[in-house]
Image (cartoon, rainbow, N blue to C red):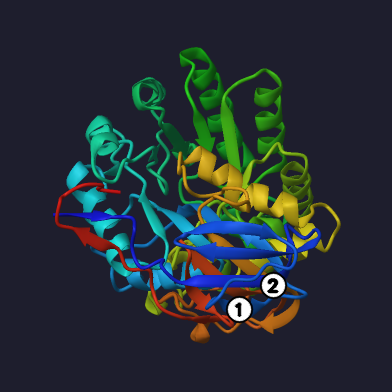
């Protein structure tokens, strides 16, 4: 017996008067898991009506970079808690990074994560496979087996650890071509960052903390775009953080190299000046950089040099962050604040529109991950992965009220704009009125057909 994707999306919902991608107000009729109609003055007998005047309708967000921690690190997060947070944040799909315990470097582990995601039912969970066995950087993991598994892995990454051996990186890039995969690189030359605690610059010099130079990131990106060009493969650069990295990616794209890049919400807003507080909540990999880097990242996202926003949602147990700086874990939560931070830094500054937002948070990340039914237009016949956003809302971040188990939000106490009012996953409302509703439930097909 195998699961089908028919699920419980049998309800009929009429969304009235939402601004589609921030444009004209229209109605959306959702029936049977798809957008049945789009237009003005729609009606449907027995439909649940959602009055959406003043709200923006967007395709469900897709995170290319999420740490769900399960299996093995359930003290930090589980697939259940992480995907609840994702749904509340407006996501309908997330890519779960491989640095679990055991590492997601075999078909068995990625299928376990895939199954946990389906059992939870809040979003589509797409496992990311490790590039190397145990993230050790010594031999390639079972890339083909993971690609052929029920999880159908298409993104591979040792995130948290750089694939620093150029020969191994070349082999990985060559291997994934066979199934249209992509290698997502954590760009960090380890010999240049040994003992590093924060961005190398004026602030690190004043604080006496070992610096993390921009060149440690930029040198790996430069190497890898050339490798990708050489073998004709797809490369994705995780969490770009420096102005120099933006220029290298821009250079590569101008030459037709098949490279994509992501930026995190926190790198769009926060700078290394915050480290003066010695608050470990601001300790992250790659580190917070300078204001000049932040401005370059925003410009790069606006002009398309940087393709997507990836949260790098990295929850940690409190004891791993509430300690002295040198001993604290690196990472920040982000699933429930990403939309608001991007609204503040990119939309309210005039750098992007809501249509641009949909491109960098949904359409392009779905394309990078080869997730066919996500990031689709809000048109009749398309899968009903839809969110409704109130752009006029203001809210104050309280990590203790979030669905994620991680309390390590760098935005705690900060007022942010925008709020997710509703999330529809496969036509089912997982979030209504800004609160969790019920998960989508897959059905079991006794005929054994349709594993996805």
| Disc marking residue 49 | 1
The residue at the far top in this view is: 230
Q: Judge from the rendering whether residue 136 lies leftward or rightward of residue 404; answer left or right.
A: left
Q: Residue at x 30, y 63 (%)?
A: 442
Residue 16, numbered circle: 2
* Image location (x, y in percent) of residue 4: 28, 54
Residue under the image location 28 percent in, 40 percent down? 136
Q: In the rendered image of this protein, does residue 373 appear above or below residue 260?
A: below
Give the Cα distance between marks 2 and 1. Answer: 7 Å
- Residue 78 seen in the figure: no
Q: Earlier in the sequence, mark 2 or mark 1?
A: 2
Element at badge 1?
strand
Q: Are marks 2 and 1 in contact (CB under 8 Å)?
A: yes
Q: In which quarter of the image is residue 419?
A: bottom right
User: What residue is shown at x 63% (from left), y 78% (from top)?
Assistant: 50
Crowd tier of the residue under label 1, counting other residues whose Cα lies within 10 Å: few below 14, some 14–19, many 20 or above: some
Percent from the top left, x then y, of residue 402?
50, 80
- Which quadrant would the N terminus be assigned to in this image? bottom left
- Where does the image place residue 329, in percent across and percent down from the top left? 43, 65
Q: In this view, does 101 lie to the left or right of 446?
A: right
- Count neighbours of disc 2 (C-alpha within 10 A) and say few if under 14, some if 14 to 19, many if 20 or more: many
Q: Residue furthest right?
A: 350
Vertical order, 109 against 398 (above or below): above
Q: In which quarter of the image is residue 314?
A: bottom left
Asked where in the image residue 106 lies, by quadrant, the reply is top left
Q: Can residue 151 be seen in this view?
A: yes
Q: Nearer the viewer, residue 37 or 321?
A: 37
Seen in the image, is 445 located left or right of residue 327? left
């Amino acid at each position: 017996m195998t699961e089908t994707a028919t699920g419980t999306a049998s309800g009929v919902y009429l969304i009235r008067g939402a601004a589609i991608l921030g444009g004209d107000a229209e109605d959306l009729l959702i029936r049977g898991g798809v957008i049945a109609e789009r237009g003005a003055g729609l009606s449907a007998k027995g439909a649940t009506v959602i009055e959406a005047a003043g709200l923006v309708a967007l395709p469900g967000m897709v995170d290319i970079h999420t740490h769900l921690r399960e299996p093995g690190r359930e003290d930090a997060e589980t697939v259940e808690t992480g995907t609840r947070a994702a749904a509340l944040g407006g996501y309908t799909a997330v890519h779960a990074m491989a640095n679990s315990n055991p590492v997601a470097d075999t078909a068995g582990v990625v299928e376990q994560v895939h199954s946990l995601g389906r059992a939870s039912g809040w979003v589509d969970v797409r496992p990311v496979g490790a590039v190397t066995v145990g993230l050790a950087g010594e031999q390639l993991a079972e890339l083909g087996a993971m690609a052929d598994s029920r999880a159908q892995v298409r993104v591979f990454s040792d995130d948290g650890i750089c694939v620093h051996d150029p020969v191994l990186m070349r082999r990985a890039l060559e291997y994934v071509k066979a199934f249209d995969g992509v290698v997502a690189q954590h760009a960090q030359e380890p010999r240049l960052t040994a003992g590093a605690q924060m961005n190398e610059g004026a602030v690190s010099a004043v604080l006496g903390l070992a610096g993390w130079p921009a060149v440690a990131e930029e040198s790996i990106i430069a190497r890898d775009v050339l490798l990708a060009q050489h073998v004709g493969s797809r490369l994705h650069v995780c969490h770009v953080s420096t102005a120099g990295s933006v220029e290298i990616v821009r250079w590569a794209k101008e030459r037709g190299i098949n490279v994509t890049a992501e930026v995190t919400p926190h790198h769009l807003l926060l700078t290394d000046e915050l480290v003066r507080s010695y608050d470990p909540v601001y300790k992250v990999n790659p580190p917070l950089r300078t204001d000049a880097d932040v401005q370059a990242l925003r410009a790069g996202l606006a002009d398309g040099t940087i393709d997507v926003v990836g949260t790098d949602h990295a929850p940690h147990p409190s004891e791993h962050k509430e300690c002295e700086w040198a001993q604290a874990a690196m990472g920040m939560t982000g699933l429930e604040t990403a939309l608001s931070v991007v609204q503040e830094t990119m939309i309210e500054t005039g750098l992007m529109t809501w249509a641009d937002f949909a491109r960098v948070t949904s359409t392009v990340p779905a394309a990078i991950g080869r997730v066919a039914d996500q990031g689709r237009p809000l048109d009749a016949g398309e899968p009903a992965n839809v969110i409704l956003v109130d752009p006029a809302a203001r809210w104050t971040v309280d990590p203790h009220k979030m669905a994620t188990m991680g309390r390590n939000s760098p935005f705690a106490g900060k007022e942010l704009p925008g709020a997710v009012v509703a999330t529809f996953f496969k036509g089912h409302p997982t979030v209504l009125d800004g609160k969790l509703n019920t998960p989508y439930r897959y059905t079991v097909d006794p005929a054994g057909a349709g594993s996805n």
